[in-house]
């Protein structure tokens, strides 16, 4: 067989096998269609335009833009989704690839004849048609484009954090470039001056905050996997071990169970590092008598998890460590007891104060609260004034830190708000003092 013929059939086979670009595992196609219809129903006019991630950079695996993935399930890079609310139709615009691009990266949805039906779209077009498509629409009366004008979020950063980190970069005027969202908005204003631009982000966030049954099942699975990963790290810890050894043990559990990897840089701090809230160097040697604090969670099918546990390197808490640990634990447990639909942060704090008084426990200044929502991002989309609703998923993480003693304690679980309370998704890793010490007693010397 001639080399050109072999190359042709290899390319055909590669295209056939490239359906992984269409849909992350464990979701139905109807899930993404339902989300698009709900978003279109919320605006009813204009065009909604969302952009995919431009492509992979660095050494990490490609991960699609959260909002784009939420409404498509597509892992095509550099693509554009357009929703037309009046017609209840959706269109995907995808870059045309060279043969070499297909060989190196795999083919995208343009080369899959079944992609339109699988993704339940009206059409899939080459991205070269995008501006003509918009020009046809923008000639109508009072045209509106709904864009993401607010900051994007990532797997590990909330929208607010993206904005803060961008502002920090801008301290150096040579790093003060426009974000992609800002650049896109400016381009639309230049090319379509008669079109009114409206921020679609609040409408997206209202949908993302409430998890669907399909999302909940994935989150339950992730909670179990991430809990097993932390348990494996606990069993790996010992005096003389390095923090990165615990990270390696935990990450192995994630990867062996289908996670893409950690949802954020693992935080494994021993001794003085327990008091650095976002410590992630993980290169210190642990010593007897110290505590180690581990903040960790997996990224499974684009949904994240968040767990923190603190335990004694030697295997048993000292009396001082017990006192601090017990205060944090009882506050955390009281918060979880208070979680149910309709509850506010103030009501949680009032409940925590009452429970600590009933138990005769000094909370050492801790008041409790609501924590942060979890989903596509570990710090998921969240309004400034949060009231709990059924279907929300939340991480609660009280902590006490004493740098002068090289002693910090944080305990965190991710919970699902149910009809009349909440379900702890990360209950598989122990947090009671006796349970922790019993688990550590099983370590091999």
Image: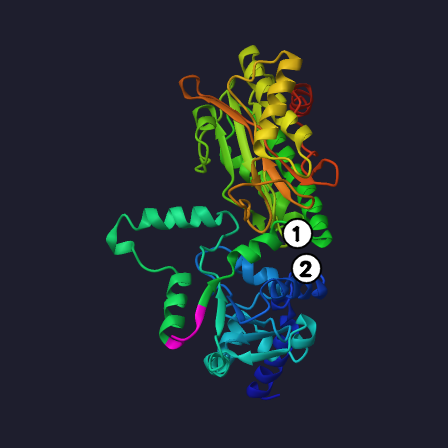
- In what quadrant of the picture does the C terminus appear? top right
Query: Which circle's residue, 2 or 1, is located before the other in the chain?
Result: 2
Residue hosting label 2: 25
Decide: is 266 above or below 443. Answer: below
Magenta-drawn stretch contains 195: yes
User: Which residue shows up at 51% across the image and 43% down it?
Assistant: 384
Counting from the top left corner in percent of width and height, residue 175 is at 29, 54
Q: Residues within 10 Å of mark 2 (few under 14, many from 20)?
A: few
Question: Does the residue at mark 2 contact the one at mark 1 (Cβ under 8 Å)?
Answer: yes
Q: Is residue 144 left or right of residue 86?
A: left
Q: Secondary structure at mark 1?
A: loop
Decide: is 350 above or below 223. Answer: above
- From mark 2 to mark 1, how far is it between C-alphas? 10 Å
In the image, the segment drawn in magenta is 191-196
Q: Residues within 10 Å of mark 1 (few under 14, many from 20)?
A: some
Q: How many marks?
A: 2
> Who is closer to the viewer here, 321 or 137?
137
Residue 396 in view (yes/no): yes
Q: Is residue 11 left or right of residue 134?
A: right
Counting from the top left corner in percent of width and height, residue 199 is at 48, 61
Residue hosting label 1: 258
User: Which residue shows up at 45% across the image and 38% down it?
Assistant: 280
């Amino acid at each position: 067989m001639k080399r050109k013929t072999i190359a042709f059939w290899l390319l055909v086979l590669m295209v056939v096998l490239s359906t992984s670009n269409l849909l992350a595992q464990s979701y139905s196609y109807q899930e993404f269609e339902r989300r698009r219809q709900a978003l279109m129903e919320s605006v009813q006019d204009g065009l909604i335009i969302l952009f995919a991630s431009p492509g992979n950079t660095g050494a990490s695996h490609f991960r699609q833009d959260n909002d784009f993935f939420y409404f498509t399930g597509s892992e095509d890079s550099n693509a554009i989704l357009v929703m037309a609310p009046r017609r209840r139709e959706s269109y995907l615009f995808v870059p045309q690839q060279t043969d070499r691009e297909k060989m190196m990266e795999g083919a995208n949805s343009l080369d899959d004849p079944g992609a339109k039906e699988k993704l339940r779209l009206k059409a899939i077009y080459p991205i070269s048609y995008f501006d003509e498509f918009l020009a046809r629409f923008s000639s109508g009366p009072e045209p509106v484009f709904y864009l993401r004008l607010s900051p994007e979020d990532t797997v590990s950063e909330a929208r607010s954090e993206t904005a803060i980190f961008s502002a920090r970069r801008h301290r150096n005027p040579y790093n003060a470039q426009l974000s992609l969202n800002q650049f896109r908005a400016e381009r639309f204003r230049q090319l379509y001056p008669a079109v009114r631009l409206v921020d679609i982000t609040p409408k997206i966030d209202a949908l993302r905050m409430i998890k669907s049954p399909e999302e909940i099942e994935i989150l339950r699975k992730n909670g179990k996997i991430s809990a097993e990963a932390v348990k494996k790290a606990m069993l790996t810890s010992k005096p003389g071990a390095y923090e990165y050894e615990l990270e390696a043990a935990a990450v192995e559990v994630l990867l062996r169970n289908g996670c893409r990897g950690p949802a954020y840089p693992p935080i494994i701090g021993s001794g003085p590092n327990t008091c650095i809230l976002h410590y992630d160097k993980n290169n210190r040697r642990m010593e007897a008598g110290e505590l180690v604090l581990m903040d960790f969670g997996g990224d499974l099918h684009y949904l994240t998890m968040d767990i923190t546990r603190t335990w004694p390197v030697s295997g048993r808490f000292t009396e001082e460590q017990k006192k601090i640990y017990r205060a944090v634990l009882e506050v955390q447990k009281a918060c979880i007891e208070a979680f149910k639909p309709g509850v506010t942060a103030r009501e949680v704090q009032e409940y925590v104060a009452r429970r600590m008084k009933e138990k005769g426990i000094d909370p050492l200044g801790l008041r409790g609260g609501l924590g942060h929502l979890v989903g596509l991002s570990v710090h998921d989309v969240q309004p400034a004034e949060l009231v709990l609703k059924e279907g929300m998923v939340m991480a609660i993480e009280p902590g006490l830190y004493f740098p002068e003693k090289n002693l910090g304690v944080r305990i965190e679980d991710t919970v699902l708000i149910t009809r009349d309370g909440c379900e702890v998704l990360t209950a598989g890793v122990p947090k009671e003092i006796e349970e922790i010490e019993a688990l550590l007693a099983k370590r091999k010397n």
